[in-house]
C-alpha cells in the first residue's frame, strides 16, 4: 500500500513534455501545484531550444518558492520510447527529429538541479497512485485513453515495466480479429475502438451509413466532437461511445483475470467524457471474466486530470535524495 509518510517533504518541479505543449508545475511539501508555466513545445526547433525555454521557466518557478535553494529537484516526463535509467529519449514519434536525446542530462545541465526522466503514462500513474484516485490502494492500473491507448501498472507500490520495459500496451489487445486495421499494423485492437481518432472514424462511418444530411456532417470530425454530441444525446455518438466502453471493459476484464488487480483509473482526453464511456465498460466486465473477479473490479476516472503527470514527476523528483 502506498505510504505518503515515507516521502521527504521538499519543493520540487514537475515537467510534462508533450508533442505540442510543455506544462511545468512548482509543487510544495503538501503536494500542491502552487506555480505553473505552459509553453509551446515547438518540436521542429529541436531539443536544445526546448530545454532552454524549460530552464527559463524553471528559474521563474524557483522564484515563487520561499527560497529558490529549497527546490530539491526536477521530474520530467515525455512520450516514449525512452530509457528511464539512462535518461535518454530514444525516438518519440510525436517529437520529430528527437532521436537519442540525453534529455535528463540536458535539463540538469541547464538548471543546475538533479533530474529524473519517466514515460508520461507512468508519471501520470504515479501521480494518481500517490495523490489521486489510487490513494490507499496496493495495486492499480492507470489506462490512458486519448490519441492512443496505453497503460501503466503499479503492483505493490512499484511500477511494473516488464523485462524489456514494454509492459502496459493494453491498447493493442485484440478485441475483434475481423475489426479495423490499427496503426500498429494489427487488426481489431482496443485502440481501434477507444482512441480519439477511432471515435472520430467510427462516428463518420455511422453518419455516412445513415445517409445523414450534409448539414449534420461537420467538415472536421474529432474525438472531442463525438463526446460533445454524445453528451447532448446524439444516438449515433452514444452508440460509438458504447462500443468504445465495451472494448475498454473487455480489456479490463482480461487484465483483471491475468493480474488480479481491482482498481483501474482511466485518464487523458477521451476519459473526460466520464460515465458515457465508463458505464459501458463497467457493464462489459462481468461478461468477460469470472463474476467473482468482476465483483471486485472498480473503474474510475482520474481525479487529477492534467496535474497527474506533474504530480507524478514531483514524486519522482523527491526520490532523487
Image (cartoon, grey):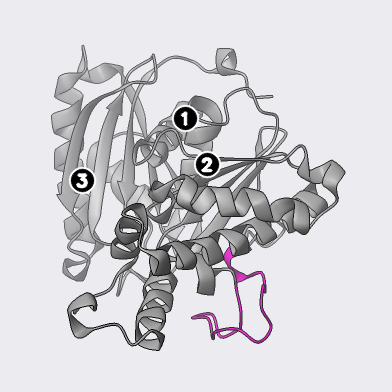
In the rendered image, which residue does mark 3 sit on?
54
Determine the CA span between mark 1 and mark 2.
11 Å
Determine the CA span between mark 2 and mark 3.
23 Å
Residue 53 - label:
none
- Our reading of the magenta stretch's main secondary structure is loop
Determine the CA span between mark 1 and mark 3.
19 Å
Secondary structure beneath disc 3?
helix
Given residues 185 and 174, the one toward you in this image is: 174
In the rendered image, which residue does mark 2 sit on?
125
Secondary structure beneath disc 2?
helix
10 Å neighbourhood of mark 3: few (<14), some, or many (≥20)?
many
Looking at the picture, how far across and down is residue 294, in whole percent?
77, 45
Looking at the picture, how far across and down is residue 140, in whole percent?
65, 39
In the rendered image, which residue does mark 1 sit on?
315
Q: Which residues are magenta?
A: 170-189
At x 47%, y 34%, the residue is 127
At x 23%, y 76%, the residue is 216
- Would you say the residues marked 2 and 3 are in contact, meaning their CB atoms lie under 8 Å apart? no
Amino acid at each position: 500500500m502506498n505510504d505518503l509518510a515515507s516521502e521527504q517533504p521538499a519543493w520540487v518541479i514537475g515537467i510534462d513534455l508533450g508533442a505540442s505543449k510543455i506544462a511545468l508545475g512548482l509543487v510544495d511539501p503538501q503536494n500542491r501545484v502552487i506555480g505553473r508555466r505552459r509553453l509551446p513545445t515547438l518540436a521542429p526547433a529541436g531539443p536544445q531550444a526546448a530545454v532552454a525555454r524549460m530552464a527559463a521557466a524553471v528559474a521563474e518557478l524557483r522564484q515563487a518558492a520561499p527560497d529558490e535553494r529549497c527546490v530539491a529537484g526536477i521530474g520530467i516526463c515525455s512520450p516514449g520510447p525512452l530509457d528511464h535509467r539512462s535518461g535518454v529519449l530514444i525516438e518519440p514519434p510525436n517529437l520529430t527529429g528527437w532521436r537519442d536525446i540525453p534529455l535528463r542530462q540536458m535539463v540538469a545541465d541547464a538548471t543546475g538541479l538533479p533530474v529524473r526522466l519517466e514515460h508520461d503514462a507512468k508519471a501520470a500513474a504515479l501521480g494518481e497512485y500517490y495523490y489521486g484516485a489510487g490513494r490507499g490502494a496496493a495495486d492499480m492500473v492507470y489506462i490512458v485513453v486519448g490519441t492512443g491507448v496505453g497503460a501503466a501498472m503499479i503492483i505493490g507500490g512499484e511500477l511494473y515495466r516488464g523485462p524489456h520495459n514494454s509492459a502496459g500496451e493494453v491498447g493493442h489487445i485484440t478485441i475483434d480479429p475481423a475489426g479495423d486495421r490499427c496503426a500498429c499494423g494489427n487488426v481489431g485492437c482496443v485502440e481501434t475502438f477507444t482512441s480519439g481518432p477511432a471515435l472520430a472514424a467510427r462516428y463518420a462511418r455511422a453518419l455516412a451509413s445513415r445517409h445523414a444530411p450534409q448539414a449534420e456532417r461537420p467538415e472536421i470530425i474529432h474525438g472531442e466532437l463525438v463526446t460533445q454530441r454524445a453528451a447532448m444525446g446524439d444516438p449515433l455518438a452514444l452508440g460509438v461511445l458504447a462500443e468504445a466502453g465495451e472494448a475498454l471493459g473487455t480489456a479490463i476484464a482480461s487484465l483483471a483475470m491475468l493480474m488480479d488487480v481491482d482498481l483501474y483509473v482511466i485518464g487523458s482526453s477521451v476519459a473526460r467524457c466520464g460515465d458515457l464511456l465508463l458505464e459501458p465498460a463497467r457493464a462489459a466486465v462481468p461478461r468477460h471474466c469470472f463474476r467473482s473477479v468482476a465483483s471486485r473490479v472498480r473503474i474510475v476516472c482520474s481525479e487529477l486530470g492534467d496535474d497527474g503527470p506533474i504530480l507524478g514527476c514531483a514524486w519522482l523528483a523527491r526520490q532523487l535524495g
